[in-house]
Image: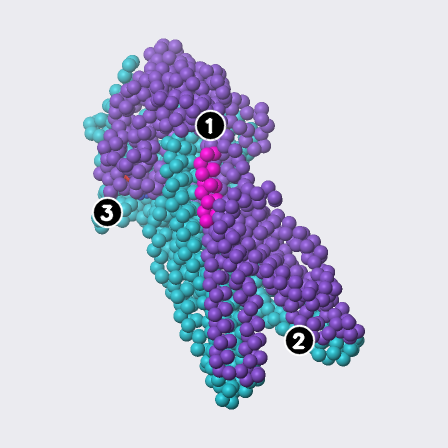
Amino acid sequence: MSGPQDDVIGKAYDARLMRRLLVYLRPHLPAVAVAFVVIVAGALVELAQPWLTQRAIDTYIAQKDVDGLRWIATVFFGLLVANFVFEYVQTVVMQTIGQKIMRAIRLEVYGHLQKLDLAFYDRNPVGRMMTRVTTDVDALNDLFASGVVTVFGDVLALVGIITAMLWMNWRLALVAFVVLPGILAATQWFRTNVRESYRQVRGLVAKINAFLQEHLTGMSTVQLFRQESNAFERFDRINRDHRDANIASIFYYALFYPIIETMAALSAALIIWIGGGWAGDGVVSIGVLVAFLQYARRFFQPISDLSEKFNILQAAMAASERIFTVLDTPVAITNPTNPPHPNPTRPVIEFDHVWFSYVDADGEPQWVLKDVSFVVQPGQRIGIVGATGSGKTTILSLLMRFYDVQRGRILVDGVDIREMDLAMLRGTFGLVLQDVHLFAGSVASNIRLGRDDIADEAVAAAARAVHADAFIGRLSQGYATEVAERGATLSVGQKQLLSFARALAFEPRVLVLDEATSSVDTATEALIEDALKVMMQHRTVVAIAHRLSTIQDMDRILVLHKGELRESGTHQELLALRGLYFRLYELSRVRENIGS
Amino acid sequence: MRRALSRLLPYVRESRRAFIIGVGCIFVASVMQLASPWVLKYAIDGLISGASRGCLAGYALAMLGLAVVDGGFRYLMRKHLIGASRTIEYALRNDYFAHLQRLPLGYFQSTRTGDLMSRATNDLSAVRMMIGPAVMYFASTALGFVIALAVMFSIDARLAWIALLPMPIVSVATRYFGKAIHDRFERIQAQLADMSAVVQESLSGVRVVRAYRQEDTEIARFRRSNDEYVARNRGLIRLQAAFYPSLTFCFGVSSLIVLWMGGRDVMAGTMTLGSFVAFLRYLVMLSWPMIAFGWVINIAQRGLASWGRMIEILDTAPAIDDRDARPDALADGVKGDVEFRQLSFRYPPRAGEGADDAAPMLADISCTIAAGQTVAIIGPTGSGKSTLVQLLPRLHDPAPGTLFVDGIDVREIPLARLRGAIGVVPQEPFLFSDSLAGNILFGFDPVRDRARVDAAAHAAGLDADLSSFPDGYQTVVGERGITLSGGQKQRTAIARAVAADPRILILDDALSAVDTQTEETILRRLREVRRGRTCLIVAHRISTVRDADMILVLDSGRVVERGTHDELVRRAGLYARMDQQQRLEDELAAS
Ligand SMILES: Nc1ncnc2c1ncn2[C@@H]1O[C@H](COP(=O)(O)OP(=O)(O)OP(=O)(O)O)[C@@H](O)[C@H]1O
Ligand SMILES: Nc1ncnc2c1ncn2[C@@H]1O[C@H](COP(=O)(O)OP(=O)(O)OP(=O)(O)O)[C@@H](O)[C@H]1O
Ligand SMILES: [Mg+2]
Ligand SMILES: [Mg+2]
């Protein structure tokens, strides 16, 4: 459940990540500008308040000028209202930008996930990918909502104060700045360490999610085998690592802020000590010194604010690394730019010396299919038989281009499928998978999926063809009955019937069946076969089956053995061969006839 | 709300030491922080009055010392308070998962996985924010607030009361905003859970999505959920955007009133200018706690909303548990007699259905199985076969007095003991992303021994495929066994059940994905395994069930025929028809 990806992630360069994140800000630049103006205005209003109080005391109260005081109070009230408005606008604008950016990133990540190939999903647990789309993106919120823009304000203030200090007395300024290298060093220390623990935290959140998604979906298996305490222990371990990684990060930032504060105090102490000496020698005036002490405090305010933002930044960096890793995962199965036109005179499907392996062992491909070649003509009905694990499902997966072949090629309508438009390729086939998957939604929506153009009648006709209408009719709301996640409230056979109906409702040119009736009772199976004969009269069918009875009247039968295509021909031809197929056949006959 | 908080109390109590130390540190640190401006003031006075170098150095050192001590205590404060919140988060998550482990199959069939996951991460993190940072900021500003207030009262009590005038408004506003934040955040979290569920579902059905070109549909579905999430968030943003400044505004108004009234007093001569200025300075000190207060309210309301969502799950009583169990039931081992006694069963109504809408799924099933016997169950799709065998390990609960093991009602046998005696191969095998050996030894605790794996794999016919696994039985399979073929998954599940060495073995259509030859091999080897064990076999093929001691033919939840193969064939009923048809198919092939 834990792939390598969760632990090692390339230490990407911050600036590059940051630049990439800032790109998302671009569409919102006008709003950012508004926010910026409002922030500056708000700061001015805030500065004006002490100044007004000052004026009120010094000029009006001291001189007992009631009218003047009333005037000041009026202005003061006006400023309060203005402040309210500015703050409101600032929050709304900034946070909305943050939300919009996260929405865009989420959609982008999800869109990319929808393009990635099956091999990616073989390696990556679903829970991990869910984390990328949800929690990892949420970790960017603070960055955009309160970080980026206010950082500009802090930097601006910092530059202003530094200039003022240098201008007033550069020597004293240098004394005050003595601590800067210390601050930089502390920042560097914080950056590397906290980043590392944030990285771990993000990885562990993904692990928690992966663990949960796996164990919640498989909970009944855990319970049946009384593995609750085992599973709990494993969960506890991940959970504990997560806690410890977080506590480790507390150490860094719990120490970082005090260090910055101490540096500020050190700077003030130096000014008093060294500057005080210089004042004694008459090098600086007392007035400058006092002003300096006050400036020094202001000088550290933005630095301390910035270090707060720094924390946000590090968290965002750790999350964005992971998000960008997904976005940068190349799409292995791509759509060609200039798909050639299909040639209707060619066979529908051609496998041309196909070799395929899912994984390499010690650099050697583990061939699952070895030199497989066959041809399917339009309207032909092809059966594939073979022992379990011989590569039957793999043939269909390659045909759908879930994976790309390593050697040889597959042609559909005379076009190499790697050069064919993906949607067109997959649209050619109606696939019933060996592992049924239903979605939460109504029965009807599980048959037509997103194809709203499939009318209710067509849905019902497809269900009738596979004799699913009987049980659907017994459901309380018929076709509108809600199906639970993964179809959990239906029997396995019923699920299989629905996914069969789905394939028929799409009216594909080629029907591709992978053990499509393995969990259906034999009576229904026979009825479906009859119905199919009518429905698929002129269509091409490729069917995998374990029971020879289901495929024996096919136009041609392919016999697969350990990834090799060993025999092919009609039922009778194969029997005459007296090879693998013959033996299989004999066996099943013997078994059916024991006891009679 | 009080009830919700009281549910948190035990966790807080567990870490009370950390909380006490943390708050103590806050106290010390706050005093230090208040002291440092005083030192600075003295230093400036000293500079002006031309104090000696040594004296100045003393001030400098004092300032530095205060900062170091202040920093040290702040470090301890963070370490303890935030650390405690992490510890509580950890405990809560563990308890949450442990609770989910007690809930029955039916619960997971009616709940979305993504939703449950979202509560364990997103909601829990909001709860943690309430326990840790919110408490910390509240405590660290409360002290400053109190001190400033005390000084203000000591300077001029009347003015201090006046300064507090807007407070009732603040409290009304806080209550209003607090409730609104709570409600809106709850809806946000619900939407986030929905979004998680959408992603979870679509990614776990990735093959169907690709095969049927549903990528755009899925993206559209996600976009809707995403948009709704952002829309709900924007509702909260507007609220929050009004909340903070309204606190600042109230505070500003009170400054204004003080300025006005106090100014009049000074003019009238009832107050000195000096104390008025001092009063104003302390009033300013109140502003930061006010802002922090708003922030704390916000975080606390979010935390409460999320905690409510977690409690919802934690309060779900496990529908199947040991409440009727007798600890001594079957304490010295299970023999394996099974009896169904007029068993009827209905699933809980689906959403939108009345309680009586659904006809019973199983009706009036009676059957006695002696230990060591093999009983086969056959019947059309949806006739209730899986339901029937799932009742035995109590994945669903049978009514009292209808299902017995060794003569004892299954509800009276402790769950762990009951399930420990039963090995199940579910119709849809579920494998974990672990090695094959780990999956096979799943139901078996001691150190992994090879012999047991080998024996179980052999019995399940998995050994034939050993050469196709790169690392043998140590090969790690993908989530749900995704990197195995259908038959390999099924055989691994058989091996797992066999390895558990159960008294009662249940095979629910466990050979549907293997070819005839492999099926033959497995059946032959299972004959060995079955010896001395009670066995329930669900199947669609006559060939699989033929040599069972008894065959039950199920139709629409009723046993319509029962007997041995030969008896049933002679009876010329449903079973005989099935037999004939399956034979016919093979005859046809021969022609
Ligand atoms: N995604 C995958 N990654 C790695 N190996 C795989 C993957 N899918 C299948 N395999 C391996 O490839 C081989 C062929 O698998 P395939 O699913 O094609 O068999 P099959 O003929 O369909 O078998 P069955 O009848 O049991 O369904 C098996 O040894 C299997 O373990
Ligand atoms: N959790 C559930 N909630 C409500 N109804 C259910 C639930 N599980 C199954 N059902 C319904 O109960 C009936 C019997 O289901 P069951 O899974 O027992 O059938 P089965 O005989 O095993 O069929 P199959 O041969 O297809 O496996 C079906 O009509 C199904 O729709
Ligand atoms: Mg297969
Ligand atoms: Mg079933």
Instruction: Give the camera-side residue of B269 and B327.
Output: B269
Tell which tag, 1 or 3, sits nearer the viewer: 1
Mark 1: give few (<14), some (14-19) or many (20+) Cα within 10 Å. some
Task: State the separation of the CA atoms marked 2 and 1.
Answer: 73 Å
Give the drawing colour for chain B. Answer: purple
Q: Chain of mark 3?
A: A
The answer to whether residue B481 is above or below residue A321 is above
Classify mark 3: helix, strand or loop: strand
Q: Main secondary structure of the magenta part?
A: helix
Give the residue pinned by disc 3: A361
Q: Amino acid at mark 1?
A: Asp
Classify mark 2: helix, strand or loop: helix
Task: State the separation of the CA atoms marked 1 and 3.
Answer: 48 Å
Question: Mark 1 touching mark 3, by CB under 8 A?
Answer: no
The image shows residue A174 at horizontal and vertical percentages of: 46, 81
Q: Chain of mark 1?
A: B
Locate ligand 1 by image quadrant: top left
Q: Which mark, by number, is residue A428? A: none
The answer to whether residue A71 is above or below residue B532 is below
Q: Total of numbered circles in the picture?
A: 3
Give the residue pinned by disc 1: B322
Give the drawing colour for chain A. Answer: cyan
Q: Is residue B247 magenta?
A: no
Classify mark 1: helix, strand or loop: loop
Give the residue pinned by disc 2: A51
Query: Which residue is depicted at the point 32% across and 36% down?
Result: B439
Task: State the separation of the CA atoms marked 3 and 2.
Answer: 76 Å
Query: Which residue is depicted at the point 40% across and 44% down?
Result: A236
Looking at the rendering, in which quadrant would you find the C terminus of chain A?
Answer: top left
- Tell me if I can see residue A183 in this picture: yes
Instruction: Give the camera-side residue of B503 and B530.
Output: B503
Looking at the rendering, in which quadrant would you find the N terminus of chain A?
Answer: top left
